[in-house]
Image (spheres, helix red, strand yellow):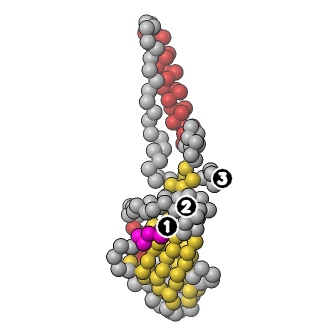
Amino acid sequence: MGFGFGFGDDHPAALAPRGHSLSGEQQRALHHHELMQHHTMNRAMLLDPNRYSTIKVQGYSFSLNAPAAGFFLMGTAAPFNVTLQPNSKIRPKRMVSNAPAPMMITLSAVQIANVNVLTGGSDDAFIYSPNSFGLENEFPTLDTSTRATMTGSYSGYTPVGFANNFPFTFVLTFQGPAALAGNG
């Protein structure tokens, strides 16, 4: 998962009872019991990290597909403009594309909640390929009432290993912490 949720982080150790003098054996038994409780809580939080929170958050993906209905044909240049709103509130931390080669897909605008996150000129979508692992961004929060939009073009370039007229869909995915469905 990742996304900075702190899975497996240590919880503060329980305080020993005050004003009681315990024998060495009792202290060892109490210490063993506290360690067991601490370890059990850490393990339980791996399965249910939202256990003690009123806001339930997990890591989700939200994707835009271009063209919105159908596919591109390799070798045939085409522009695209796709917009969609998520089904749950999400704070994207990473943007990933399935562009298999440089100079194939150009992104001229990527808007998250009406903010263009490309602050300069166009970006090559290959920059956001899975090879960009570790690239982390800060994007505005997308709510169910706001939209993400990507505008760009497919250059018509057919990468090695693909045939002309091969159908493909360009996917731009936003990953990050999101409210669990039904969270309110």
**Amino acid type shown at disc 2:** Asp
Image-based side of 87 in relation to 15, left or right = right
Is 44 in front, or is 24?
Answer: 44
Seen at 43% across and 63% down, the residue is 139
Tag of residue 113: 1
Expressed as whole percent of the image width and height from the top left, the position of residue 33 reads 52, 21
Q: Secondary structure at mark 2?
A: loop
What separation in Å lies between label 2 and label 3 (alpha carbons)?
A: 13 Å
Q: Is residue 30 visible?
A: yes
Expressed as whole percent of the image width and height from the top left, the position of residue 34 reads 49, 23
Looking at the rendered image, the disc whose residue lies closer to the viewer, 1 or 3, is 1
Q: Is residue 61 visible?
A: no
**Amino acid type shown at disc 1:** Ala
Stretch of the chain drawn in magenta: 112-117
Q: Secondary structure at mark 3?
A: loop
Expressed as whole percent of the image width and height from the top left, the position of residue 169 reads 56, 80
> In the image, is residue 173 above or below residue 67?
above
Seen at 55% across and 50% down, the residue is 57
What separation in Å lies between label 1 and label 3 (alpha carbons)?
A: 21 Å
Q: Earlier in the sequence, mark 1 or mark 2?
A: 1
Q: Earlier in the sequence, mark 1 or mark 3?
A: 1
**Amino acid type shown at disc 3:** Gly
Tag of residue 182: 3
Q: Secondary structure at mark 1?
A: loop
Whether pointer 2 and pointer 3 mark residues with C-beta atoms closer than 8 Å, the reply is: no
Expressed as whole percent of the image width and height from the top left, the position of residue 118 reads 39, 73
> In the image, is residue 109 above or below residue 76?
above
Seen at 44% across and 20% down, the residue is 15
What separation in Å lies between label 1 and label 2 (alpha carbons)?
A: 8 Å
> In the image, is residue 50 above or below residue 74?
above
Whether pointer 1 and pointer 2 mark residues with C-beta atoms closer than 8 Å, the reply is: yes
Q: Which residue is mark 2?
A: 143
